[in-house]
Amino acid sequence: MAAKYVYFFGNGQAEGRADMKNLLGGKGANLAEMTSIGLPVPSGFTITTDVCTYFYANGQQYPATLAAEVAENLKRVEALMGRTFGDPKNPLLVSVRSGARASMPGMMDTILNLGLNDETVQGIIAQSGDERFAYDAYRRFVQMYSDVVMGMEKDILEHLLEQKKEAKGVHLDTDLTAGDWRELVGVFKATIKETLGVAFPENPQDQLWGAIGAVFGSWMNQRAITYRRLNSIPADWGTAVNVQSMVFGNMGDDCATGVAFTRDPSTGENYFYGEYLVNAQGEDVVAGIRTPQPINKANGKDSCLPAMEDVLPECYQQLVQIRGILEKHYKDMQDIEFTIEKGKLYMLQTRNGKRTAKAAIKIAVDMVKEGLIDEKSAVLRVSPSQLDQLLHPSLDPKAKKTVIAKGLPASPGAASGEVVFTADEAESAARLGLKVILVRVETSPEDIHGMHAAQGILTARGGMTSHAAVVARGMGKCCVAGCGDIKVDYAANQFVTAKGELVKKGDIITLDGSTGEVMLGQVPTVPPQLTGDFGILMEWVDRFRTMKVRTNADTPNDSKVAREFGAEGIGLCRTEHMFFEAERIAAVREMILSEDVEGRKRALAKILPMQKGDFIGIFREMKGLPVTIRLLDPPLHEFLPQEEKDVEALSKTMGVSVQALKNKVDYLHEFNPMLGHRGCRLGLTFPEIYDMQVQAIMEAACELTKNEGFTIVPEIMIPLIATVTELSRLRANAVAVCEEVMARSGVKIDYLIGTMIELPRAALTADEIAREAEFFSFGTNDLTQTTFGLSRDDAGKFLPFYVESGLLEEDPFVSLDQNGVGQLVKMAVEKGRGVRSGIKLGICGEHGGDPASVIFCHRIGLDYVSCSPFRVPIARLAAAHAVLGE
């Protein structure tokens, strides 16, 4: 049997259904469904997505049987409508619209009023009795078709239209007469021929196939490609084409067109929300040429324009009934398009409406209360990635803004403040109660105090998982990273944008970490509102998910925030972040610069009580929940000053010559510190460092167990293991310290010693390593770097090109590379459990807060994921989706 490429709908009968979106696209499937349930839908047919796939696989040719199927279904439409396509006396006009299986509003092309020419326009005049309407429709068609199909710059014809209005002394299109439109059609067609060298097509069949080809072609236009990339829509899905008989909202004052949502898409409130225009076609509502009117008084309480419920009350009441029918049928908030022709209502589209996170949660919870959906459906209705909007302040959408640069949206939220260029300035200003934005070429661990003090961070270099991005997300700070549009001049305390704007220290800027925009001045923000509906939804989420969600937290405050967001422990506590506070860095530098073990131990003894205090605070906030603490990971040179003035200051403090300090800095410098003397390699060459840290961990745990009755099970994590021999030696050292502290304290507690799997060799030999490790925590940031052989901070120079050009589907530092890095993780899970069945397995890289990565972690059987505090709810929801999607 030959493949079927065209599906008809009309007069209450449809060959398609709502569940055929993959084949008919969302628009086509829903037109068929609305027809089947008895709603007034103009008849038409849908050309399937299979044709789009064939089109691109076969040199933009169509299947051999397609033309016959289109002709057959066009005759069915003609029979229902009582009109004939191309007939000069009684013409049928059609619209040609795209319709992918995933909603892509405005991304692809539409053509209305197709079938008009110098002969058929006379038939439209005879049908309608309105010459002005007919020529208005004709000029719209010529404008659309020349743009979408013929590739004419739309501004050329738009300019001619503006010239006409100016010559006539009018402002609105509606003020032009039939003669004006007739004259413009002639001018338009002459201009097209002069500009493009080809005549505007007069044959309706040529017009139809030109439009069908243009819609299929628009699947690969740049805006559609970009939209698909941003929304993870596969390119091989293709689009359908919908050919539908035209109904007209611009035939007079008893005609209208509009767009509505069955609930408010911004707030989720349960009232009918929408706009319409009298005597208009669909594009007029969204084009902004005329001010749309509210469909009802509830929606238009701030509008002085008449509402549809007053102007066209019978049609409005019919639309209200259809609203109820659609919500009950689809069991979701709908985005609808409608047209009223001579007092008769027609439905042109329905689809699940796009909504804010706040609205998504309210609608989901309300629909459970209304009995429309169950709790499982409600949880699945809310996208994990949407929650970012709720968990950070966001810019007031009504506020004016002046965008001067754009970078990577590295950490969501919005922030305003005075520009400062050093971490010390940020901290000093914060002490005075000032709000600042820290601007750096790129940040380093030494900037941590300034990052903490600042409202937001802006860097000229670095990627989505750069230091600035990772730390900012952990802090819940707004961050725009990798902003190549700015050139930072530290000496002059200023930066210059690519557009030439000069921003100096003390000037106020605003960052939008959700879009990457940098704006001049202060733009008002809206604080996050975690309403009662949010709590209700998250209760359902936790009921369904099976995988635990921990947090990456380095301070008691981070731990507190994460716990409030529902974290079930700490999966990564990075101890090096504790070393950078002002009163500690001197002792750390003294330790590094010491020439012998005894000198290092004296310096470490100063740090010990500070680290112990940190761990007490963190254990206390977690109150018995598991805490995984990673021993020192970065190379020692990161703790030493790099700038001349800082070296001189340290020289005076320590009584060491400037040259001696410079020699030490040079000695510790590494060409590729990511692959150098760091992690367990430090612990093996300077074991006293790890001994001090383990002592601080165990003393804190024993003290709280004895004095406050907490049940604490510290999980001590040794980073960057490549061989089991590294782990066995460091494990023996750690066990000795743990036993000595417990004996001295008179307290016996359970503890675990494990490792971070972040090197391919560790994953490949996970069965050997599991003999010494009681848990694995997958450090997927470094595992991605070492598997791909690239630095995440430098990859920002070319990774965007890789993603945009299709070399990579996703940035592997944002979403886990499941086919490569993911397979190493999966192998390590299987090997580890094969040796130690009860081994605890988790992930603590930035991927722990990425929904797709969380679902992968559930699928391969990890016990938990760990992510920054502000992404904990996202990971909880993704973990529930993982279960419900099985």
Image (tube, helix red, strand yellow):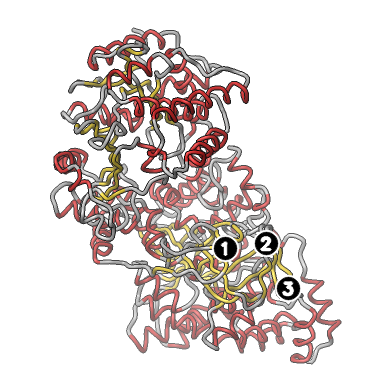
The disc, 3 or 2, on the residue closer to the chain's N-terminal end is: 3
In the visual, does 471 lie left or right of 51? right
* Near-viewer residue (507 or 769): 507
Q: Amino acid at mark 2?
A: Thr
CB contact under 8 Å: marks 1 and 3:
no
- State the CA–CA distance, disc 1 to disc 2: 10 Å
Farthest front residue in view: 168
Instruction: Please give the residue where the numbered disc 2 appears in the rendered image.
Output: 497
Quarter holding residue 810: top right
* Near-viewer residue (654 or 21): 21
Disc nearest the viewer among 3 and 2: 2
Q: Secondary structure at mark 3?
A: loop
Q: Which mark is residue 518?
A: 1
Q: Secondary structure at mark 2?
A: strand
Q: Residues within 10 Å of mark 1 (few under 14, many from 20)?
A: many
Q: Where does the image place residue 366, in percent across and percent down from the top left? A: 19, 55
CB contact under 8 Å: marks 1 and 2:
yes
Residue 577 visible in the current orientation: no
